[in-house]
Image: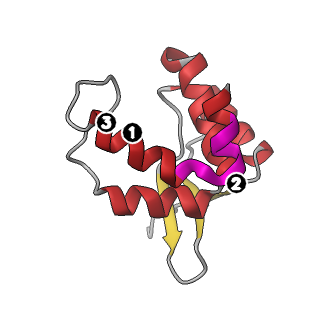
């Protein structure tokens, strides 16, 4: 709860850097250290804001098996504005699953911007 509170207060970048320095390379479920650079992750944390990041961390910490699926497909970063938008992509006839709706509800409640992109075929 203390760390979530610090993230909520906007200290996420610092906490991420300290955790990265202390634990980089250690095995952790759901984490691939080689996938993204620290600087990009810090940009994401800053763009999302403390409330959104702490909500994501809380949901995954308290119910990882239930929340490990259903997160939006994309995260669009706007480097100029320093903002981020979650995007769920749906094809023709595709509907939101219960888990996807749960994630969207959590993200919206925390103040995140979430869009649903409906893709249509050209035929």
> Is 67 above or below relative to 10?
above
Residue 87 showing in the rendered view: yes
The region drawn magenta spans: 5-12
Q: What element carries label 3?
A: helix
**Residue located at (29% from left, 53% from top):** 36
Badge 3 or badge 2: first in the primary sequence: 3
Residue located beneath label 1 in the image: 19
**Camera-side residue: 7 or 111?**
7
On screen, residue 6 versus residue 60, left or right, reads right
Query: What is the C-alpha distance between the residues marked 2 and 1?
Result: 24 Å
Q: Which residue lies furthest to the right in this view?
A: 109
Q: How crowded is mark 1: few (under 14 residues within 10 Å), some or many (20 or more)?
A: few
Label 2 vs label 1, nearer the camera: 1
Residue at 62%, 28% in the rendered image? 58
Q: What kind of element bears circle 2? A: loop
Residue 106 versus residue 79 in the image, above or below = above
Residue at numbered disc 2: 112
Determine whether 2 is above or below 123 in the image.
above
Query: CB atoms at circles 3 and 1 under 8 Å apart?
Result: yes
Specify the label residue 22 is tagged with: 3
């Amino acid at each position: 709860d203390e760390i979530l509170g610090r993230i909520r207060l906007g200290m996420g970048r610092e906490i991420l850097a300290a955790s990265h320095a202390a634990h980089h390379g250690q095995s952790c479920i759901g984490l691939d250290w080689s996938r993204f650079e620290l600087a990009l992750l810090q940009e994401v944390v800053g763009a999302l804001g403390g409330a959104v990041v702490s909500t994501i961390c809380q949901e995954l910490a308290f119910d990882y098996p239930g929340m490990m699926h259903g997160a939006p497909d994309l995260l669009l970063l706007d480097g100029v504005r320093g903002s981020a938008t979650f995007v769920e992509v749906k094809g023709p006839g595709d509907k939101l699953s219960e888990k996807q709706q749960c994630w969207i509800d959590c993200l919206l409640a925390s103040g995140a911007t979430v869009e649903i992109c409906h893709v249509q075929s050209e035929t």
